[in-house]
Image (spheres, rainbow, N blue to C red):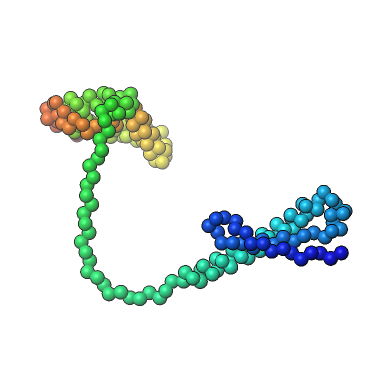
Amino acid sequence: MALEAPVVQTKHLRASAAPCRVITVPTAPSSSRLLPNCAPLLQGLAGIGLGIAAQQRHRSAVARQAAVDEKPKAAVPKAKAKAKAKAKAKARKKVVAPLSQQFMEGLFAPVVTVGYFLVGQTFVERVRGKGIELHSRAITAYCNAFGIPNKKRQGFIKTAKKTGHDLGMLAEGGIFGEGLLGKQAMELYENLGISRL
């Protein structure tokens, strides 16, 4: 009993891939008589082993050919061109969220938005910045007192920022400008020395 010759097929494994050769090797007829239920399994295993090896050889040959095709050409020195002035990037106007959306940003967003309306955006942002600075100092003092590492301290500060954003304390504003009492509020801010805390 002689074995049949292997069958070579060309298949496309992927739509974008090059065709690969798959070799299927039939098993001996005696094995199908001895183990009738295992013959398809043995045939499949033999075909898979040879097919994988053939596919790998084919892929490596394709990769080598692609590497040969893409060899860089010798660099030719170019004449230096005069440097051109770069165009300045145009400042894009920030799109302001509607008032109804700003009110819904978090628990304290309505209070911050009313603050924008009454005392102006500049005053609210400065007071909020001062509050953030004092809170960061308090976190740093706590971490220093208990020997907490700097990386953990930075995590605390990031968590505080995220929590403030989620609660609406960082509502963006941009609708009311300086508000009703903006100038007076800024004078009070400077006179009381809040910025020097």
The location of residue 98, given as percent across then percent down, is 26, 30
Residue at (88%, 53%) from the top-left corner?
Answer: 34
Q: Is residue 163 left or right of residue 14?
A: left
Residue at (24%, 32%) from the top-left corner?
Answer: 173
- Give 75 or 5, whichever is nearer the viewer: 5
Residue 118 found in image quarter:
top left
The location of residue 97, given as percent across then percent down, is 27, 33
Residue 180 found in image quarter:
top left
Residue at (21%, 57%) from the top-left corner?
Answer: 87
* Residue 31 in sight: yes
The location of residue 65, given as percent across then percent down, is 54, 69
- Give 170 or 145, whichever is nearer the viewer: 170
Residue at (84%, 65%) from the top-left corner?
Answer: 2
The location of residue 10, given as percent across then percent down, is 64, 62
* Residue 160 in sight: no
- Up-down: is 10 above or below 140? below
- Specify the quadrant that holds the N terminus: bottom right
Q: Is residue 180 left or right of residue 55?
A: left
Count of numbered badges drawn on the protein: 0
- Specify the quadrant that holds the C terminus: top left
Residue 22 found in image quarter:
bottom right
